[in-house]
Each structure stands twice: as C-alpha cells, then as structure tokens.
Amino acid sequence: MLRKENPQFAEIAQKQRIKGILTSPPYVGLINYHEQHAYAYDLFDFKRLDELEIGPLFRGRGREARESYVHGVAEVFKNCKRFLADDYDVFVVANDKFNMYPTIAEIAGMHIVNQHKRPVLNRTEKNRETAYPETIFHLKEVQKKLEPSN
C-alpha cells in the first residue's frame, strides 16, 4: 500500500531502520479502550473490533486472559523487530502486577536490561483514587552466543 501511495517514502522505509520504540501497551483487564475511544470510531466511521484488543476489560485478569495478553504483546514486539535497527532500544511503560514482562521479553527474543519503578499518583480515569506502581522496562535484542570455531 505504501509503495503504491508514495514510492519514494516506501523505499526509504524499506532501507532505514527504527532505533527505538517507547510504548505503553494496554494493561490486562483494566480499561475498556474501545469504549474509552468510541468517539473516534463514530467520527471516522471505523468498524469496532473489540474482540481483537490485547488485554481487554471484558476478558478479565484470570490465567487465560493473562496468557493471551502475554502472547499478544510478544507477537506485537516480534513484528516490530522487522523494522528495528540492530542495536535497538524498546521502552515499555507497564503496570506489571502479574510479572508478565519477563515472559513477554523472552518470547519476543528480547531481554530486560533495566527497570525503573515509579508510583502513579494521579490518573484521569474514573475510579482511580489510589496510587499504583508502574515499571518502565528497557528491552534489547537477545545477543546470540558465538560458537567457538575449531
């Protein structure tokens, strides 16, 4: 599609790689993101695909919902790696109360090189009267070990 719309830009996008990503994925079973942004679906006449959302509120926070979340986020990161430079940096802001990000990183072929914990004291969503912790994970590519040559 990009090649058809803008061949020059498509060529640049094909050759250049992204150095890093800063993201805050959905938190498992916490917010109904589709409903929170319903105005955009109405405004642009987009079809809602709530069932494809990663970590939706309607699936809850049980074991099955957490496993689905882990694999969903890991697949997104694996897909992103196709566009990343060799020595990329990925920063993920997450409320990881279920300790899922070590597994997500492993499945995605990444490792956590650092974690910064911070309290979230003020939020705009309803029913957010108490503080909770967030972690900023710094992820990098798992380095392949070189086999000794004989």
Image (tube, rainbow, N blue to C red):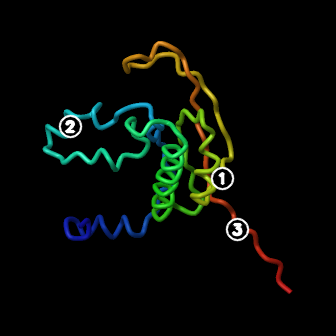
Image coords of residue 115 (percent x, y): 66, 38
Q: Measuring 46% from the left and 55% from the top, which residue is drawn there?
A: 76
Image coords of residue 6 (percent x, y): 22, 65
Q: Name the residue under label 3.
A: 144
Q: Measuring 60% from the left and 25% from the top, which residue is drawn there?
A: 118
Tell me which numbered mark, 1 or 2, is placed earlier along the sequence: 2
Quadrant in which the C terminus appears: bottom right
Q: Mark 1 points at which residue?
A: 111
What amino acid is labelled 3 in the image? Lys
Image coords of residue 30 (percent x, y): 44, 31
Which numbered marker is on residue 103? none
Using a 10 Å C-alpha cutoff, classify the residue at mark 1 as few (fewer than 14 neighbours), some (14 to 19) or many (20 or more): many
For label 1, the SS is strand
For label 2, the SS is helix
* Quarter of the rendering containing residue 134: top right
Viewer-closest of 81 and 17: 81
Tell me which numbered mark, 3 or 1, is placed earlier along the sequence: 1
What amino acid is labelled 2 in the image? Ala
* Quarter of the rendering containing residue 16: bottom left
**The furthest residue to the top:** 129
Cα gap from disc 3 to disc 2, whole angstroms: 43 Å
